């Protein structure tokens, strides 16, 4: 099973109307070259699941700016003014989710759970339209699982089996999204041979990773 | 430790610093709260948690590592003894009560401990980020904010008007005028900042409050 | 690959092996299922998942590492490309559909795909361990068991009598006599093991079953 | 904050009737010396939360054999015949929990969730007495959080801030239990200075660890 993939092949993995998850926190830990591939593939009407919409020029921001997104599910959109502008203009649907709840929903989608019972958002607008479950006298919101057709991850290092190591605060949502998509594509800075990563240090096991794209486009 | 407090934000940050104990795990919101560590005594070391996935947040020193930012997206460092993890674990810590104190800004706080600080309908909808989880899960929630809005209206209300960030979550408010605790009985005025009179606080606070007898 | 199958367990394991494809992530129950890899062709490599927290389970080679055991507690190894993780993540993989095939033993299987294999009331209550999660979450559930219990009774029933491990979870049963698929319409006999007649299977199977036309 | 602790101090941390979690899978990853300390402290009537009751001589097994346990919550008790014997004799209460559900319940207890919505156990005796929640037409069991007063962990290495690294399959339930107890005590093979562990390699952050006991009893 060769998981290595070229930029050209990456472009073929997207279709209009897809639901896409992308790792990253204000662009840090977002696979910028995979985002560019999406842009060049001219994919439209996507539903985007990401922590935030980053900035106009970085992270997943350019997908918003270039109007490729129909709906975004995120915890924060404030650093990309174009997101708010399109939302207010009625051009973009935005579902705001508390950051911890977003992480839990992605994990629930990837780990076979029926949803999450969280105290976060009780008594706020976040609870609107959601079922409340009382456990031992305390109220929790039932937040539903999220899944995507494609997850775009960024890792520091991969072996050819797809085992991943992330670097510093660029880890963020990447490991969760690896669980929750039909196809998982990772952009890595460095590729090593199978056996070169100590199994105790693996942060995402290779069985979750379908395609590996080496940053800069060179396949070893 | 800075001894001359020249502006309201410094007054607030300095007072919040007194609430922190050595070894506390603390999450600081962006803006004013990030000034708090500047006012900690030398023998008080707190451990800063950053919701984008780490413990041991430190100021930028030396070269920028593009993979190392704080929850505001700014280049930062990690201190010895720190640890990185994913966003799931970060919020396990936050929601699970493993963060001792969170300090956030506020637009409105009311007598029931409700906090509004994440949106102004029709005007500003940046998203709640991690704030809703933080106020729900942290053991102690301190709102650090200027006493009045820019238009001069009180931000300490009998009942919040803006959409809430959290319901019944605030433990303490620190402003440049005063310190309030939120109790079952509503606000209790615990302290007046230096040179501030009780009358001034009464005048500039919309909510009713009890005055701690020690102050009278 | 062993070519002479001398006992029922080997016959079963060899047949189960044919269900596995190169690259499959597979979880094998203790006992008979662990024999399956011995019967894989050389060009079929499966990745074994162990519910105590790893991927890449391999046979013990060289020195025993007391920290490295399989889910049966036996000293094992990890193959190149493997990874360790905690029990939470292990069951995220299992429940989340990231395990392609699980092969387990059975006490009873019924026409609705129910499986009983974890307890005999008043007699044997070892606990379900990870079995309930595995049958719920794995993409394909293969029960590998001898056709009859030691007392000669059929283990393939119209309805299970023992407490269930999972409801409607079984996809396939492989015994030393036959291979059944579980469908909406109940059991379908897909294959007879070498030298076994349809009459023998009918005689030794309590449940009703449809015979795949290709067999008739 | 000195987290280092001697065997004598360990003994003082237990009281009769406590709820204790202990890491380990058939004894692998169980802090054997902390278990011995409990035995020597003569603690009684504990509620024990662990994956299994291991063997009569190893893991948490001796706690069962020496009748220190009033109730055990575990996924497997088959390798320690004394557990089954005491259960059948009515001397020990046993709550059997599917292994994945046990992991989720501990995590829920440690991460502020109201419970877990799992498909595991639906249609089996496991669902008895539990609320079933239907999400989008599919049934899930509501499994409640678990917490303990003390968690006993085993790690391979710690720094003096309590940051932990586990080794091989000895990780298992340890990282989860670190979240879910009022006091977390870890037995480690090796202690290093703060700063000696790369922050990307930490598996349990030190803020969750209260006490560190170095195996063999020597404090550095």
Image (cartoon, coloured by chain):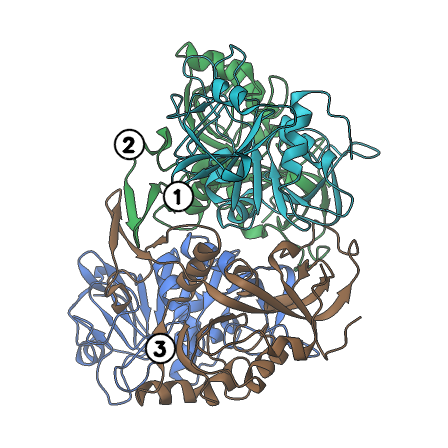
Chain colours: A green, B cyan, C blue, D brown
Q: Nearer the viewer, mark 3 or mark 1?
A: 1
Contact, CB < 8 Å: mark 3 with mark 1? no
Residue A66, given in percent of the width and then of the height, sits at 53, 14
Q: Are marks 2 and 3 on the same chain?
A: no
Q: Which mark, residue D199?
A: none
Q: State the residue in front, B43 or D105.
A: B43
Q: Which chain does the numbered disc 2 sit on?
A: A
> Does residue D171 appear in this view?
no
Residue A43, given in percent of the width and then of the height, sits at 49, 21
Q: Secondary structure at mark 3?
A: strand
- Measuring 26% from the left and 86% from the top, which residue is drawn there? C122
Q: Quick one: label 3, few (<14), some, or many (20+) residues within 10 Å?
A: many
Q: State the residue in front, B77 or C157.
A: B77
B85 over B202 or under it: above or below: below
Tell me if A199 is positioned left or right of B189 in this view: right
Contact, CB < 8 Å: mark 2 with mark 3? no
Q: State the residue in front, A81 or D135.
A: A81
Residue D196, given in percent of the width and then of the height, sits at 79, 56
Q: CA distance from mark 2 to mark 3?
A: 40 Å
Q: Which mark, residue A129?
A: 2
Q: CA distance from mark 3 to mark 1?
A: 30 Å
Q: Nearer the viewer, mark 2 or mark 1?
A: 1
- Measuring 74% from the left and 61% from the top, which residue is drawn there? D160
Answer with mark 2 or mark 1, whichever residue precedes in sequence. Answer: 1
Which residue is under mark 1?
Answer: A119
- Measuring 41% from the left and 50% from the top, which residue is drawn there? D113
Q: State the residue in front, D173 or D205.
A: D205
Q: Are marks 2 and 1 on the same chain?
A: yes
Q: Which chain does the numbered disc 1 sit on?
A: A
Which residue is under mark 3?
Answer: D94
**Hey, which quadrant is residue B200 in on the image?**
top right
């Amino acid at each position: 099973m060769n998981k290595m993939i070229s930029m050209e092949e990456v472009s073929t993995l997207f279709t209009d109307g897809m639901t896409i998850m992308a790792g990253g926190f204000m662009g840090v830990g977002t696979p910028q070259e995979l985002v560019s591939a999406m842009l060049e593939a001219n994919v439209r009407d996507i539903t985007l699941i990401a922590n935030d919409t980053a900035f106009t020029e970085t992270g997943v921001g350019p997908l918003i700016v270039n109007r490729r997104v129909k709906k975004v599910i995120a915890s924060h959109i404030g650093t990309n003014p174009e997101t708010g502008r399109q939302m207010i203009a009625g051009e973009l649907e935005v579902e705001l989710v508390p950051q911890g709840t977003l992480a839990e929903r992605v994990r629930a989608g990837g780990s076979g759970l029926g949803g999450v019972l969280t105290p976060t958002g009780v008594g706020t607008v976040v609870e609107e339209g959601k079922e409340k479950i009382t456990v031992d006298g305390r109220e929790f919101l039932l937040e539903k699982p999220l899944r995507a057709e494609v997850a775009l991850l960024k890792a520091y290092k991969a072996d050819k089996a797809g085992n991943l190591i992330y670097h510093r605060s660029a880890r963020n949502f990447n490991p969760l999204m690896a669980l929750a998509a039909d196809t998982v594509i990772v952009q890595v800075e460095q590729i090593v041979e199978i056996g070169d990563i100590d199994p105790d240090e693996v942060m995402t096991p290779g069985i979750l990773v379908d395609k590996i794209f080496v940053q800069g486009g060179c396949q070893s | 430790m800075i001894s001359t407090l020249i502006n309201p934000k410094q007054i607030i940050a300095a007072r919040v610093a007194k609430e922190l104990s050595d070894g506390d795990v603390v999450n600081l919101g962006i803006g004013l709260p990030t000034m708090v560590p500047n006012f900690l005594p030398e023998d008080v070391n707190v451990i800063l948690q950053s919701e984008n996935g780490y413990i041991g947040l430190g100021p930028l020193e030396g070269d920028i590592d593009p993979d190392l930012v704080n929850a505001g997206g700014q280049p930062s460092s990690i201190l010895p003894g720190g640890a990185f993890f994913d966003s799931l674990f970060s919020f396990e810590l936050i929601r699970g009560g493993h963060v001792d104190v969170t300090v956030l800004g506020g637009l409105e706080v009311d007598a029931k401990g409700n906090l509004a600080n994440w949106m102004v309908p029709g005007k500003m909808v940046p998203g709640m980020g991690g704030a809703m989880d933080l106020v729900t899960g942290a053991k102690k929630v301190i709102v650090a904010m200027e006493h009045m809005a820019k238009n001069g209206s009180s931000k300490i209300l009998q009942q919040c008007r803006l959409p809430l960030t959290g319901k019944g979550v605030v433990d303490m408010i620190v402003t440049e005028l005063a310190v309030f605790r939120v109790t079952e009985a509503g606000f209790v005025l615990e302290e007046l900042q230096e040179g501030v009179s009780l009358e001034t606080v009464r005048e500039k606070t919309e909510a009713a409050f009890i005055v701690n007898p020690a102050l009278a």
